[in-house]
Image (cartoon, grey):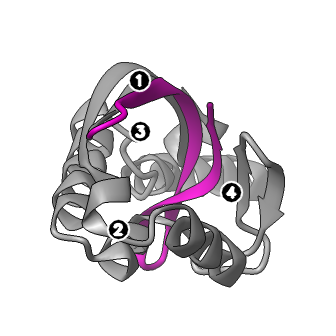
Amino acid sequence: MATVHLLALCLAALPLGCASAPAPVSTTEVQALLDAQRAAWDQGDLEAFMAGYWRSPQLGFVGSTGLTTGFDETLARYRAAYPDAAARGTLTFELVRVTPLAGGRAAVAVGRWHLARAEPASGWFSIVLERRPEGLRIVHDHSS
């Protein structure tokens, strides 16, 4: 009889566990993060641009110069590579695909970036995003 009551209790608790699961990272959320980054970039505010990244020494960024590890190091890399408005240009993103991972708590997003400037530049990116206590954040970025 005790087993029946335990089973009933466990079954009754199942909806509670399901209700607390986060919604999968959506294309809309990723696009909103990229839109905020684009606006900050175009205003020349690299600190606000970096707000979309995980503020951690474990943040990873892979670009044309190789791997950069850490939030502060990634910000320093951006400052060195894009020191003024002429170097930064105007940024656009085209989000191609978002694939949820880890039960929806994370996702991989793939897209294209473009800088409109005297010498235009463009390429592809793949970012890993994770739902963190502070919100959706990029935890790894590979841009080429």
Say whether marks 1 and 3 touch (CB < 8 Å). no
Residue density around tag 4, few if under 14, some if 14–19, many if 20 or more, within 10 Å: few
Q: Which residue is mark 1?
A: 112
Residue linked to disc 3: 24
Cβ atoms under marks 2 and 1 closer than 8 Å: no
Mark 1 burial class by Cα count in 10 Å: few <14, some 14-19, many 20+:
some
From mark 3 to mark 4, how far is it between C-alphas? 31 Å
- Vertical arrangement, residue 3 with respect to residue 53, above or below: above
Q: CA distance from mark 1 to mark 3?
A: 22 Å
Q: Secondary structure at mark 4?
A: helix
Front position in the image: 63 or 7: 63
The kind of residue on which mark 2 rests is Phe
First reached walking from the N terminus: tag 2 or tag 4: 4
Q: Amino acid at mark 3?
A: Pro
Q: Which mark is residue 49?
A: 2
**Residue ID at (46%, 63%):** 82
